[in-house]
Image (cartoon, rainbow, N blue to C red):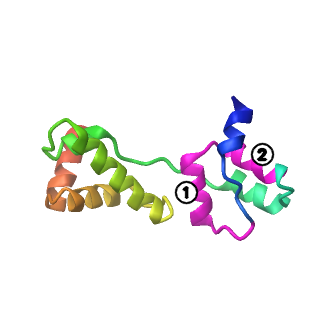
């Protein structure tokens, strides 16, 4: 399994900034990225950066979309993918409140309603 994952895992480069590395970490296993750098003859500083960066975790779930009054179905997944793409484009650093605000914007719901809905979901 690991060898198969390594085949499809992109190789980070020394020119990648922290945003690019966080995007990779959000989509791939940390060790697979480190192994790809090692296999490509990458330098220790890049492997160290991959080791020390926090693993980004997208902070929203389908229940956050449902809490806005969006009915079950493909719209839930579509909105989550769209907000996750926005989160990744920003370097995977936006926190839950920022992601909820973006979800509300994309769902055409007032941001205050999204924050209230999020409190009910917890």
- Nearer to the camera, 75 or 22: 75
Which residue is located at x 55 percent, y 47 percent? 27
Across and down, in percent, residue 100 comes to: 28, 55
Across and down, in percent, residue 39 comes to: 83, 49
Which residue is located at x 77 percent, y 55 percent? 47
The answer to which of marks 1 and 2 sits earlier in the sequence is 1
Prevalent SS, magenta region:
helix
Mark carried by residue 23: 1
Q: Is residue 100 left or right of residue 1?
A: left
Q: In this view, does 7 lie above or below 89?
A: above
**Image quadrant in which you'd find residue 29:** top right
Local secondary structure at mark 2 = helix
Quarter in which the C terminus is drawn: top left
- Nearer to the camera, 48 or 26: 26
Across and down, in percent, residue 28 comes to: 60, 45
Q: Is residue 58 among the parts visible in the rendering?
A: yes
Per the rendered image, the range of residues in magenta is: 14-38
- 28 in the magenta segment: yes
């Amino acid at each position: 399994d690991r060898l198969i994952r390594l085949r499809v895992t992109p190789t980070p480069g020394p020119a990648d900034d922290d945003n690019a590395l966080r995007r990779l970490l959000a989509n791939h296993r940390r060790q697979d990225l480190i192994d790809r750098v090692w296999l490509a003859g990458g330098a220790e500083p890049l492997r160290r950066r991959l080791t020390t960066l926090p693993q980004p975790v997208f902070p929203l779930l389908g229940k956050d979309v449902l809490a806005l009054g969006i009915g079950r179905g493909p719209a839930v997944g579509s909105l989550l993918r769209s907000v996750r793409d926005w989160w990744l484009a920003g370097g995977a650093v936006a926190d839950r409140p920022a992601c909820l605000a973006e979800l509300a914007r994309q769902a055409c719901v007032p941001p205050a309603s999204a924050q209230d809905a999020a409190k009910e979901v917890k």
